[in-house]
Amino acid sequence: LMGGMHLFSADDQTLLWTSDRLRKIGIQNLMAGHCTGIEPLIRLRSGLELSRRTAVVGAVGSRFVYGEGIHPTAIAQ
């Protein structure tokens, strides 16, 4: 999943609901836009049981390659 999720000011209930729904549809990689927020991304990463390699805040130059996963830029690593 790539994109801005606009969760910067989301409450705990919203983040739990979102991670639950994303887990149910089988999200394996998450490259969130800056508008998602760092803390919400960390909470989603935890709820989805993803790693720092599979859940990042995207930055200019970051890319996703099918079969390889996320290739973040240095700022997102």
Image (spheres, rainbow, N blue to C red):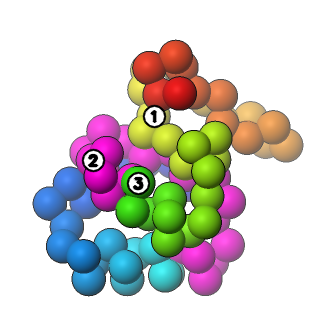
Give the image location of residue 46, x and y in percent. 50, 64
How far across and how far down the image is residue 13, in percent? 26, 83
Question: Does residue 76 appear left or right of residue 10 in this picture?
Answer: right
Question: Type of residue at label 1?
Answer: Gly
**Res. 58 in view:** yes
Q: In this figure, which residue is indicated by the disc labeled 1? A: 58
Amino acid at pointer 3: Ile
- Mark 1 vs mark 3, foreground winner is 3
Residue beneath the point at 74% across and 35% down = 65
Q: Position of residue 16 (x, y in %)?
A: 37, 79
> Residues under labels 1 and 2: Cα distance?
11 Å
Q: Position of residue 37 (x, y in %)?
A: 27, 47
Q: Where does the N terminus fall, quadrant-wise?
A: bottom right
Q: Considering depth in this image, is 2 or 19 the residue closer to the camera?
A: 19
The magenta region covers 22-41
Distance (Cα) linking label 2 and label 3: 9 Å
Residue placed under numbered mark 3 in the picture? 42
